[in-house]
Image (cartoon, rainbow, N blue to C red):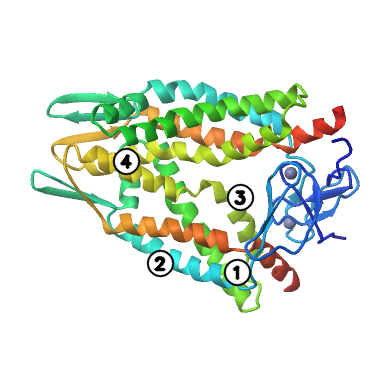
Amino acid sequence: MSKAPTAARSGLLACEVCRLVSHAPPPGSDAYCPRCGAMLHMRKPASLARTWAFLIAAIILYVPANTLPIMDTSSLFGTQSDTILSGVAFLWTSGSFVLASLVFFASVMVPLVKMIALAVLAGSVQMRSVAHPRTRTRLYRIIEFAGRWSMLDIYVVTILVALVQVSTFASIHAGPGAAAFGAVVVLTMFAAASFDPRLIWDIQEKES
Amino acid sequence: MSSPTFVACLECDLLHRQTQLPSGGEARCTRCGALLYRHAPPDANERALALALTACILFVVANVYPIVGLEVQGTHTSSTLFGAVESLWDDEARTVAVLVFFTTIFVPAAELIGLTWVLVTLRQGARGRGAVAILHFIESVKPWGMVEVFLLGVLVSLVKLAHIAIVEPGVALFSFGALMAFIAAAAAAFDPDAAWKQLETIR
Ligand SMILES: [Zn+2]
Ligand SMILES: [Zn+2]
């Protein structure tokens, strides 16, 4: 495992935009890709600090995202506020078990698992863990891809507001929870984009 | 001073020598399993252009027609995607309105128009104005185009509304379905390496 032929060890830099591998300039000077002109970095700049910052902001906003209503419905029968979870419960009790599971998975499980996974990834790099590098890289690949599905409920609210607001029998308004929830999705996407999985492997080589 | 025969894994930094792949093949990192590159047929970007052009047309149809209609007690209402964004904006849910606009209208449109422009100009053997900047932009906004998630969201809201009213899927709903498929197909067909190599020769 030690002394793997990495780009960094060979004095090469890979462009993250066009993937061209080029020679690293002398330390201290900025590097640009000779083919596409993108700025080159050996590793994503301030990766851990930025990941933690976005992640902590996401964790804080996860509380209002789940406790504040994402939708207020007023009709002849009164007013009703829906949080993410009560929306799932509504789908479940009305017999749409598949959709209830789908929304629960996308809106509750995905953000939660994504935040835990990012904390595990950033924490393990910080503590210089050498365990399961391949599994951790795969975990990163999955959460980077899966996070977008959490936007599901935002789109549901959008359609419901648009269609029911104009009709006479009821009106639906977006609640403050929707903005908080949207922010959680955006922040976890930034957190995932800030994390550099190559850090997992750098430790691997130094410690072995 | 470049080494075009090498490719570095973006997830673990391991260096690999690039080899000729069989048709339809893909190369994965030997250490972490990340995708390194795919085999691209010589006409890959021709196909990507045809798919992107079709997606552009579908995008227009999907945004002009209503996504879904609703009938309650004889009154009919319907909304386009942009109309839905406007309702959110008027409803003081501005953050959400901006987020929906960005992920379902702005990013997919910018990606499709940008990709089409770059591919059309490359096909004519020219370097389109801003081609490099456009390809950089497409690469950076890629995760923010969420047409497929939006489509699922519409289906969920259809089921929710079916409890209180008669719902009528609109023309745009089917167009969005097709748009999702064509965006995915264009992205899969697009061979960025060939485009970059071609851009490098036209200066
Ligand atoms: Zn480059
Ligand atoms: Zn790798």
- Measured Cα–Cα span from mark 2 to mark 1: 20 Å
**Image quadrant of residue A20?**
bottom right
Q: Please give the residue where the numbered disc 1 appears in the rendered image.
A: B44
**Helix, strand or loop for disc 1:** helix
SS for tag 4? helix
Label whose residue precedes the other's in the sequence (4 or 3): 3
Q: Secondary structure at mark 3?
A: helix
| Viewer-side residue, A123 vs A207 | A207
Q: Which callout, 2 or 4, points to the residue nearer the camera?
A: 4
Q: Is residue A165 visible?
A: no
Left or right of B148? Residue A140 is right
Q: Please tell me whether mark 2 sits on a helix, a strand or a loop.
A: helix
CA distance for labels 4 and 3: 29 Å
Q: CA distance from mark 3 to mark 1?
A: 22 Å
Residue displayed at 86% across by 45% down: A5
Spatial distance from mark 2 to mark 3, Cα to Cα? 24 Å
Tell me what residue is drawn at x 34 percent, y 51 percent.
Answer: B81
Lower sequence index among marks 4 and 1: 1
